[in-house]
Image (cartoon, helix red, strand yellow):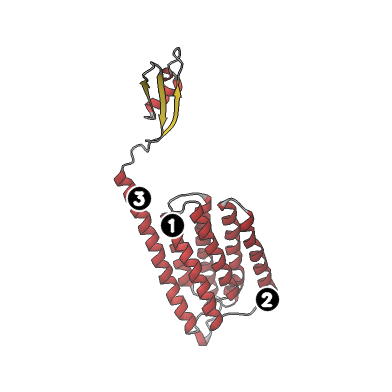
Amino acid sequence: MMVVTRAMAHDEQDPCRSPLTAQARRSGLSGCATTLCGKRCLWLVNPTPNVSHADMFDVTVSKAVFSAIALGLTFVAFYPYARAIMKEETRPHVFSWYIWGAGTFVVFLAQLSDGAGVGAWPIGVSGLMTIGIAALALSKSADTSFERMDWVFLSLALSALPMWFFTSSPLSAVIILTIVDLLGFGPSVRKAYRAPWEENAVFFSLGAVRNGFVLLALENYTWATALFPLAVGVACLFFVMLILSRRQVVARHPANS
């Protein structure tokens, strides 16, 4: 439907007979006409073949549904986790959650800039709720014990965040912040290895499934839009496996039974 090229040919040259035009015509991408001055005119169009408005509407609705499911899973995952913190049944590591929250929200902005559409909204909501979880944990029974390695993880993460302002490509920012988010697993991995019963395996399982629906909801598939939910989803799966495997080795504390 959109004219992308239009060339006026000389009288002695017929563009409609060229091999390139013949190939374009077979693909339904070209047309020819005779102008008032007798010259042949060639145009190339870039339609969306075999895609009807109904099909486009169905795809749009599907993306919105996947995004809504991802948002729903976000709230389903965070509510019991917040309640467990209030009951002091779960003691999340504050460093990890602040790193995750800040990085996730900036990735949301980067995804929007690269056309992720409705698929980015669950990431943005998740970033805000993650920061909220960190604040709630800090006011309750959070794990605030810091070791030297925790400071290393935090320093690496914070050094990566300002680089967002020095990159013009959304992909560069997403790569940096995906690394930041994965670094945020460091303190929690150490903690889950030592005290697996203090981590919530169901929450991270829902996080993995949620990121799967985020991928389905993306309106534009590029590394900038898909890398973060893909990497975090896989990381959540491995974290759940670590928690469950360590629970087979470490006895549950009587206070948590």
The residue carrying pointer 2 sits among few (fewer than 14), some (14 to 19) or many (20 or more) residues within 10 Å by Cα, namely few
Kind of residue at disc 1: Gly
Q: Secondary structure at mark 3?
A: helix
Q: For this view, does 199 lie left or right of residue 74? A: right
Residue 249 % position (x, y): 55, 76
Pointer 1 local density, CA inside 10 Å: few below 14, some 14–19, many at least 20:
many
Q: Position of residue 128 (x, y in %)?
A: 49, 69
The residue wearing badge 2 is 147
What distance separates the C-alpha of mark 1 from that of mark 2?
37 Å
Q: Are marks 3 and 2 in contact (CB under 8 Å)?
A: no
Residue 59 place in picture, x, y as percent: 35, 50
Amino acid at dot 3? Val
Residue pointed to by mark 1: 119
Between circles 3 and 2, the one closer to the viewer is: 3
Where does label 3 land, which residue?
59
Where residue 145 sits, quadrant-wise, is bottom right
Q: Where, by quadrant of the figure, is residue 155 drawn? A: bottom right
